[in-house]
Amino acid sequence: MKICMIGTGYVGLVSGTCFADIGNQVYCVDKDVAKINKLNSGISPIYEPGLDELIKKNFKAKRLYFTSDLKKAITVSDIIFICVGTPNIKGSLKVDLSFVFKCIKEILLFTKKKKIIVTKSTVPVGTGDQIEKIIKKKKKLFSVISNPEFLREGEAIRDFRYPDRIVIGSNNKNEIKIMKKLYSPLINRGAKFFSTTRRGAELIKYAANAFLATKITFINEIANLCEKSEINVQDIALGIGSDTRIGGRFLRPGPAYGGSCFPKDTKGLVSAAEKFKTNLSIVKSVIKSNHDRINLLIKRVHNILGNNLKGKKISVLGVTFKANTDDMRDSTSLKMLPYLSKKGAIISYHDPSGEKKEFKKLINCKFKKNIKENCLNADLIILLTEWDEFKSIDFKKAVKKKNFKIYDLRNIYTREEMKRNKIKYYSIGRPDVN
Ligand code: NAD
């Protein structure tokens, strides 16, 4: 099939490349010309394991094209996927759909033959209906389908190839059949395919993300209780997660959840529900708890350093919102590092995905090219992101100072190891090692 992906970000680039890899002709379009130029010269603009090789392979095979020429891409394609961002409107819970609607208006300008428009972007319930209103005059030329994307950054290629489910929202049997054909290589491998109404598909995505965010927030709050009551939260996670009704995944406590999806989608869901006069009180309290969590972690850093951050050398390991991605959106580091800098700490950080522009203007905050250089002079090491590279550091060798401390926000180190090495160790929801 001939496909156009509008928006060549984490979702559009990965799914476009993977669609090409299963034999389709794919045109990835982006308004960001620099991004398209980079891609055409063989460089991926994002960090995603395995993506570079897959882009090269399909580009060479002439199944994958990168362009800013929307007209050409639309003219040749049968299916147009909308993969542009849907952020929150600044200072509001509402979703900014302007990028989506702008795409629709552009598509209208260039379409003469029948096309299927698919929203892969996460959009609130009723967005498909709104799109239909925009295309009113050319209604016969389009059908609008919802096909939410569930891939996770860092695991995106695997998630595309082996999804838990493929959800299609449409009331038209023929279009569902076309979408099923497109996904048949994945369905034949065992992926569950199911169709529902368009509004149903739109809500599934938000409900899934809100549920996962709730699970994370729940275990984070239980971890707070464990810290006060000298209980190991990992025992609790195992004890409750072994119940098949609950399940063990997403029961790892850590920093506030971040990234490009959970923070904005929980807010977007609350706002969409309000439009339908429905109060989602659980999701509201999840948003509040997650917001408060960052302050709680900062307070803990204060306590660990004896309530005086001035002149203290803090080495941060990992600043992205999770491992195996370069995505900084809503990462805990974005609030924590500026705070520590403001309070006079001397910060260094290392992240395998490279230096971050977000910290360039911070006072006393420097990127270090390797772990050793980053840890050398630390009074406190804060492990923020669970990159594999950080899992087996010999801290006794890496740090020069005698009484350095470690605050492990992902519980990647064992308390036993820290005890053995006589390192002062603080983690999430587990008794301290002093
Ligand atoms: P992104 O910001 O990485 O990419 C969006 C791209 O769209 C950008 O490159 C931008 O330049 C381009 N764009 C915007 N308007 C355009 C236009 N009119 N024409 C052409 N290009 C345009 O976003 P993302 O992380 O890929 O997310 C896209 C959507 O997918 C969002 O709705 C998000 O919620 C959803 N989603 C994201 C993930 C994820 O892990 N990132 C997972 C599932 C779903």
Image (cartoon, rainbow, N blue to C red):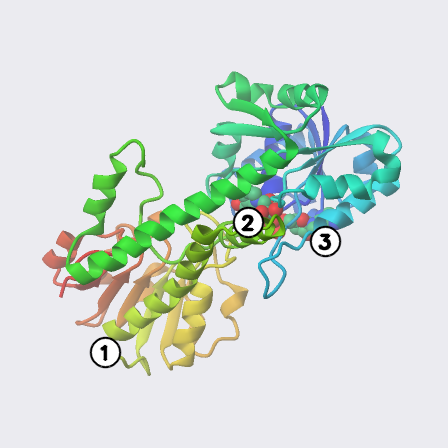
In the displayed structure image, the side of residue 374 where residue 281 appears, left or right: right
In the displayed structure image, the side of residue 237 where residue 98 appears, left or right: right
Q: Quadrant of the C terminus?
A: bottom left
Q: Counting residues from the N terminus, which is met first, the one under dot 2 or under dot 1?
A: 2
Nearer-the-camera pick, 421 or 308 = 308
Q: Amino acid at mark 3?
A: Ser
In the displayed structure image, the side of residue 329 where residue 428 appears, left or right: left
Alpha-carbon distance for marks 1 and 3? Answer: 48 Å
User: Given the current orientation, which residue lies at the most extreme front position?
Assistant: 277
Pointer 2 with pointer 1, Cβ within 8 A: no
Query: Relative to residue 129, is residue 430 depicted above or below?
Result: below
Query: Relative to residue 30, is residue 290 depicted above or below?
Result: below
Q: Amino acid at mark 2?
A: Thr
Pointer 3 with pointer 2, Cβ within 8 A: no
Pointer 1 with pointer 3, Cβ within 8 A: no
Alpha-carbon distance for marks 2 and 1? Answer: 46 Å
Q: Which mark is residue 306?
A: 1
Rendered image quadrant of residue 175: top right
Q: Counting residues from the N terminus, which is met first, the one under dot 3 or under dot 2?
A: 3
The percent coordinates of residue 124 (x first, y second) are 62, 46
Q: Counting residues from the N terminus, which is met first, the one under dot 1 or under dot 3?
A: 3
Nearer-the-camera pick, 179 or 242 = 242
Q: Which mark is residue 278?
A: 2
Query: Relative to residue 422, is residue 22 depicted above or below?
Result: above
In the displayed structure image, the side of residue 167 where residue 225 appears, left or right: left
The percent coordinates of residue 41 (x first, y second) are 67, 45
Q: Amino acid at mark 1?
A: Gly
Sort mark 1 into few (<14), some (14-19) or many (20+) by Cα contacts within 10 Å. few
User: Which residue has dot 3 on it?
Assistant: 98
